[in-house]
Image: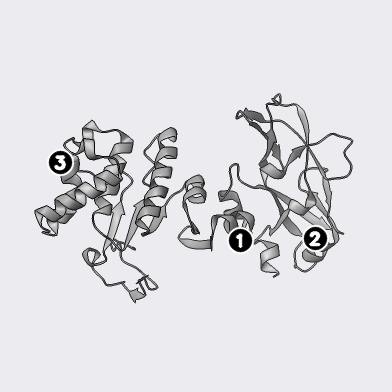
Amino acid sequence: MIAGLESISEGELLIDGKVANQTEPKNRNIAMVFQNYALYPHMTVEDNIGYGLKVKKEKKSEIKNKVHQATELLDLVDYLNKKPGELSGGQRQRVALGRAIVRDADFFLMDEPLSNLDAKLRVVMRSEIIQLHKRLNTTTIYVTHDQIEAMTMATKIVVMNKGEIQQIGTPKEVYNSPNNTFVASFIGSPSMNLLKCQYENGKLFVNDTDDVINLNESQKKLLTKIDTNQITLGIRPEKVEIAEEHDNKRPIIHSSVEVSEFHGSETIVFSNISDFMFAAKTKGDNIYDNNAAINYTFDINDLYFFETRTGENITIKMK
């Protein structure tokens, strides 16, 4: 819709403060980078990058100059005479970026540009796009389903679900203060643990378990303000620790190990708790046997509270 390739059924699209609903795509001065690169296989790198300028009937000397500047910026000078079939995935993505750069567009639209690359190349290209954005200082709308890309690349994130905006904020704001359980479960790797509970007399009773969490006075005050006792408790995996059975100073969640993933500097342990795959990030190289009994604990000050029915963050709702 932003590019003008689909009609807007409701609302207004403002570009640079002007309503652009009826503006033709060719007049919006937007440069797009597609998921599948959309390169012409019979054209060289030089011709692919300069093709849009040729269609606009710009001077050959101007096209050559812009293409040269873009290929220098993207380290493609040595590949000007090669065709897309002779390039790696990363090089083809750079060509697609180059074609956008030479347009001198008001802003860029990038539609999951790294989704076709392998994991190692994604990391490299993320860094390159970040550096490119800093050099060009051009507004970029970057569509992705990869929350790591969103967290590492964005200055502002718009989280959407089924076409509706769930939250807008900086990566830190979205991570630390998710508006609802959808945002909480999308941002973070692994995502936030979400356990359905019943609230009674200052305590949270975790559904389908015998575990009880005693809350502090400010948390009790918060939860007594709402008209439901159906609460979803949230806790980030990195805030969860493996507990000793005799630790009675903090809450303890009893379970068994479903799977243990060794990641080098850390191990992530998963357990099925209240029909949720609960995760804990532990430092070091501890390996936990499948089905082994395990106890989890955490600081109650690190807890989030959501309404189970609506998914809303209670702390934000009651501000």
Q: Are marks 3 and 2 in contact (CB under 8 Å)?
A: no
* Amino acid at pointer 3: Met
- Whether residue 228 is visible, yes or no, is yes
- Which residue is drawn at the image coordinates 75% and 67% (left, top)? 226
Circle 1 Cα neighbour tier, 10 Å, few/some/many (<14 / 14–19 / ≥20)? many
Disc 3 or 1, which lies upstream in sequence?
Answer: 3
Q: Is residue 50 above or below residue 17?
A: above
Query: Closest to the observer: 319 or 129?
Result: 129
- Which residue is drawn at the image coordinates 82% and 62% (left, top)? 220
* Amino acid at pointer 2: Gln
| Residue linked to disc 1 | 179
Circle 3 Cα neighbour tier, 10 Å, few/some/many (<14 / 14–19 / ≥20)? some
Left or right: where 276 falls relative to 45: right
* Amino acid at pointer 1: Asn
Disc 3 or 2, which lies upstream in sequence?
Answer: 3
Closer to viewer: mark 3 or mark 1: 3
Query: Closest to the observer: 149 or 76?
Result: 76
Counting from the top left corner in percent of width and height, residue 69 is at 24, 49
Q: Quadrant of residue 78?
A: top left
